[in-house]
Amino acid sequence: MSGPVRGARAAVVDLCRAMAGRGLVVGTAGNVSVREGDLLAVSPAGTPYATMTADMVGVHALDGTPVHTPLRPTSELALHALVHTRPGAADGEVVLHTHAPASTALSTVVDEVPLTHYYAAFFGGAVRVAPYARFGTDALARAVLDALRDRSAALMGNHGAVLVSADAAAALDRAAYLEYVCDVALRALSTGLPLRTLDPAEIEDVRAGLAGYGRPVPPADGS
């Protein structure tokens, strides 16, 4: 296949390998999808990331119907399809499902990530934890979709995390911030001391302040 779908399939491979390189997954755990128009490029099941190629990445319609599937797709295809068709979903979006240690561990002890760090603003506020449901099920997909309401990340109870990014370039950085926020909360909880958490209103103010985070400061004359 060629054109933009080919680019999306290549992006899936790059993201899978980068997730493994950053310790966000173990073995072939986790999965990635990239939306291009009315199609989704979705990582295949049980394929080592080091040997994965773009030709191995399947293409599906937005409802999950196979279009070009050289290998069996990830068991979480239903989850990816549902997230990519939620209200407000856009072309070019990326969905990452990780199995990183801190976020996975935290998903076993809280229903919502405590607001122990202002980086929660990157995700629209306190990150919710979707109740546990078996991997690959519609129940899990629906639970995650509900946890993502007005958020760009959610934890999956006793499982891992899901992150939505507007593009591939920002996806990995946001995944790293999510793992950091979870690690900070997990370490704070492990002390047994009372948590000093931030007010949701403060997180909302920070969210507005981070809108241009990482962008060059414009010239004083506005040109």
Image (tube, grey):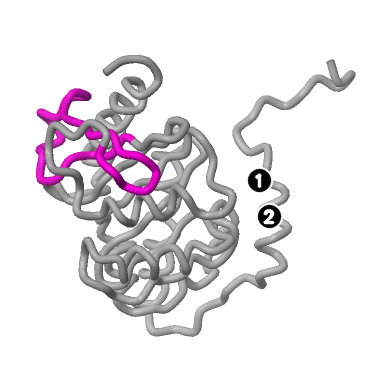
**Residue range highlighted in magenta:** 41-66
Which residue in the structure is indicated by mark 1? 210
- Left or right of 163? Residue 156 is left
- Left or right of 40? Residue 217 is right
Which residue in the structure is indicated by mark 2? 206
Q: Give whichever of 190, 97 is nearer the camera.
A: 97
Residue 43 in percent (x, y) is at 23, 39
- Label 1 Cα neighbours within 10 Å, binned few <14 / some 14-19 / many ≥20: some
As shown in the figure, which amino acid type bears the numbered disc 1? Answer: Leu
On the question of residue 18 being in view, the answer is no
Is residue 49 one of those drawn in magenta?
A: yes
Q: Residue at x 60, y 33 (%)?
A: 214
Q: Give whichever of 148, 40 is nearer the camera.
A: 40
Q: Residue at x 43, y 53 (%)?
A: 83
Residue 45 in percent (x, y) is at 14, 45
Is residue 113 one of those drawn in magenta?
A: no
Q: Are marks 1 and 2 in contact (CB under 8 Å)?
A: yes
Q: Residue at x 40, y 62 (%)?
A: 182
